[in-house]
């Protein structure tokens, strides 16, 4: 069985679609299973004046999905982490270069050869003869 590029592309599309549509899935489930949720899972069946019709179950499912989508940093965790850093100073290394190994040539002197055209003249447009 060979996996084609189109097959992988379709698989990636399906995965991305479910990741994007995940918050909406409880609403779709509510719409598809409306009768079952309104008659069996609704918590306010005994109070028909509220006209809940399973919306209480839908709100619970939406809250559960939102809780799962929260990043781990926002969720409260029961443990605290501490970073322990170790530091060990490096041994000092003294480098000495004997003067006999230094170059004997004189280094060239820096010369500022930069020049520019000064734009100090003020532009005056030509006069029009009337």
Image (cartoon, grey):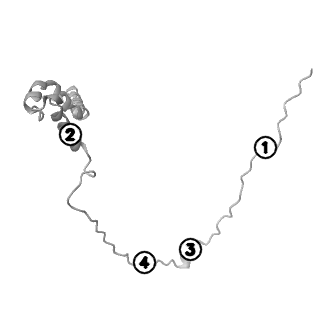
Picture coordinates of residue 40 (x, y %)? 7, 30
Picture coordinates of residue 75 (x, y %)? 24, 51
Residue 107 falls in image quadrant? bottom right
Image: 99 above or below 67:
below
The secondary structure type at the circle numbered 4 is: loop
Which label number is shown at residue 65?
2
Which label number is shown at residue 93?
4
Q: CA distance from mark 2 to mark 3?
A: 72 Å
* Among numbered discs 3 and 4, the one appearing first in the sequence: 4
Residue tagged 3: 102
Say left or right for 18 vs 94.
Answer: left
Q: CA distance from mark 1 to mark 3?
A: 47 Å
Q: CA distance from mark 3 to mark 4?
A: 20 Å
* Among numbered discs 1 and 3, the one appearing first in the sequence: 3
Q: Name the residue nearer the viewer: 35 or 102.
A: 35
Task: Give the quarter of the figure containing the N terminus.
Answer: top left
Q: Name the residue nearer the viewer: 65 or 101.
A: 65
Image: 74 above or below 60:
below
Looking at the rendered structure, the number of numbered marks drawn on it comes to 4
Closer mark to the observer between disc 2 and disc 4 = 2
Residue 52 shows up from this direction: no
Residue drawn at (74%, 47%) of the image: 116
Picture coordinates of residue 108 (x, y %)? 66, 64
* Among numbered discs 2 and 3, the one appearing first in the sequence: 2
Q: CA distance from mark 2 to mark 1?
A: 68 Å
Image: 70 above or below 54:
below
Which label number is shown at residue 119?
1
Closer mark to the observer between disc 1 and disc 3 = 1
């Amino acid at each position: 069985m060979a996996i084609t590029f189109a097959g992988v592309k379709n698989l990636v599309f399906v995965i991305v679609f479910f990741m994007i549509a995940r918050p909406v899935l409880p609403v779709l489930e509510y719409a598809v299973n409306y009768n079952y949720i309104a008659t069996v899972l609704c918590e306010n069946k005994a109070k028909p004046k509220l006209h809940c019709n399973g919306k209480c179950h839908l709100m619970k499912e939406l809250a559960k999905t939102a809780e799962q989508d929260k990043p781990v940093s926002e969720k409260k965790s029961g443990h605290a982490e501490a970073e322990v850093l170790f530091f060990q100073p490096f041994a000092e290394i003294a480098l000495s270069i004997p003067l006999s190994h230094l170059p004997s040539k004189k280094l060239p002197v820096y010369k500022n050869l930069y020049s520019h055209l000064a734009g100090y003249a003020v532009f005056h447009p030509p006069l029009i003869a009337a």
